Amino acid sequence: MERESWASTAGVARSMRSNRRRDTSPELALRRILHARGLRYRVDFAPLATMRQRRADIVFTKARLAVFVDGCFWHGCPDHATFPVRNADYWLPKLERNRARDLETDAALADAGWRVIRIWEHEDPTDAADRIEAAYRASP
Ligand SMILES: [Zn+2]
């Protein structure tokens, strides 16, 4: 029996909408909290000069701390990554590439002395802000 078309499921449709490149509402909520706590950061910024395409969502340059707010669908969140039933041949390699790319980005940043925090878009923004602030305060 064929399951419903992947895009017709509310969850995936929501993920698709909330996975625009930047300025997603979870990210905005998080930025608002960080800003209210007095933290200052750059937005949509490439930490590494050698990897200009790998832009992090929130970057603390002096603290060398890069934050990515990952969409549950595109980055394969263990709780919400829905399996695209239709066009799986198209989607699965694409999603797999995203995850490989994330790992590669994290490794490159770590090699260059950066700390990386990845936040799922489903996470509570206050909890996420707590993690980020703790890492920021623990900066050398
Ligand atoms: Zn999720």
Image (cartoon, rainbow, N blue to C red):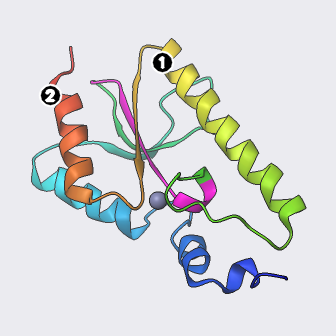
Residue at the spot of label 1: 110
Which residue occupies the foreground of this view, 57 or 128?
Answer: 128
Contact check, label 1 and label 2, Cβ < 8 Å: no
Q: Amino acid at mark 1?
A: Ala
Q: Residue at x 72, y 77 (%)?
A: 6
Looking at the image, residue 118 lies above or below residue 94? above
Q: Amino acid at mark 2?
A: Arg
Task: Let me know if residue 75 is in the magenta part.
Answer: no
- Residue 55 in the image: state x and y as whole percent: 53, 41
The quadrant where residue 83 appears: bottom right
Q: Position of residue 68 (x, y in %)?
A: 44, 44
Write the residue at 48% across / 18% down.
110
Q: Is residue 26 above or below residue 86?
A: above
Relative to 7, say whether 94 is above or below: above
Distance, label 1 to label 2, CA atoms, is 18 Å
Q: Which mark is residue 48?
A: none
Judged left or right of residue 93, residue 123 is left
Name the residue at the left extreme.
Answer: 37
Q: From the viewer's perspective, tell me whether residue 89 is left or right of residue 9.
A: right
Q: Which residues are magenta?
A: 63-74
Q: SS at mark 1? A: helix
Q: Which residue is mark 2?
A: 137
Q: Residue at x 27, y 49 (%)?
A: 128
Residue at image coords 19%, 50%: 34
Residue 109 image position (x, y, % from top left): 50, 23
Q: Is mark 2 within 8 Å of ligand 1?
A: no
Q: Quick one: label 2, few (<14), some, or many (20+) residues within 10 Å? A: few
Q: Secondary structure at mark 2?
A: helix
* Placement of the N terminus among the 4 image quadrants: bottom right
Q: Number of marks in the image?
A: 2
